[in-house]
Image (cartoon, rainbow, N blue to C red):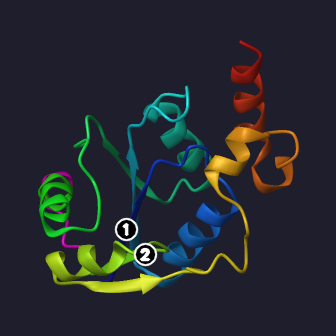
Amino acid sequence: MKIGFTIGKFAPLHKGHQYLIEKGIKEMDQFYVIVYETNVIDIPVEQRANWIKQLYPEVKILLAKNPPAQYGLDEESIKIQMDYLKNIIKDIPVTHFYNSEPYGKFVARDLHIEEVQVDRKREKYTISGTKIRKNVKENKAYVEEIVYEEIKHKKQD
């Protein structure tokens, strides 16, 4: 059985994330999405996970609460992050890690699974959560309506 997963803040969920998730769903027997808690957006991790669940009910969601503050591509940071991630997926026999980030090779290496790179150069979707957070209206085309409405509402608070 092929069991894939991806991780992210999904702050907010956008078309690039969706492309990656949809590829995982299509190629795997089971697909997990791990949603990380973050302070870069004023929308709780549970709500960001709910966006994914509403759009992709077949996906299994795991929440990554209180993640380590230290991150980077140095071995110490990788170990800290990987220990945290291993605890989240502890009993799930994952076989593939879907991502578009440089750290993907370390996740695959440390879990002894296959890495699946998806649109690493951002050629299919030239968007990021940072761009959307900076100007929600200008980047509305990159997010689903359920996401847009919540972000727009938060910006007005």
Q: Nearer the viewer, residue 40 or 5?
A: 40
Check contact, mark 1 vs mark 2: CB within 8 A. Answer: yes
Is residue 16 shown above or below 80?
Answer: below
Q: Is residue 92 in the magenta section?
A: yes
Q: Is residue 90 shown in magenta?
A: yes
**Depth order, front residue of 21/28:** 21
Q: CA distance from mark 1 to mark 2?
A: 6 Å
Mark 2 residue type: Tyr
Residue at the image position 19 percent from the left and 64 percent from the top = 78
Tell me the crowding category of disc 1: few under 14, some 14 to 19, or many 20 or more residues within 10 angstroms, Cα based.
many
In the picture shown, does residue 102 fall above or below 21? below
**Bounds of the magenta span?**
87-94
Rendered position, 45 above or below 58? above
Majority secondary structure of magenta residues:
loop
Element marked by disc 1 = strand
156 relative to 17 in the view: left or right: right
Q: At which x and y percent is residue 122?
A: 65, 75
Which residue is labeled 1 in the image?
5
Q: Residue 22's x, y, as percent?
A: 59, 71
Q: Can residue 85 be seen?
A: yes
**Splitting the image into 4 quarters, where does residue 99 fall?**
bottom left
Q: Is residue 136 left or right of residue 10?
A: right
Q: Is residue 8 left or right of residue 108?
A: right
Camera-nearest residue between 33 and 39? 39
| Residue furthest to the top | 157
Q: Quadrant of the N terminus?
A: bottom left
Q: Quadrant of residue 128?
A: bottom right
Displayed quadrant of residue 102: bottom left
Locate the C terminus by quadrant. top right
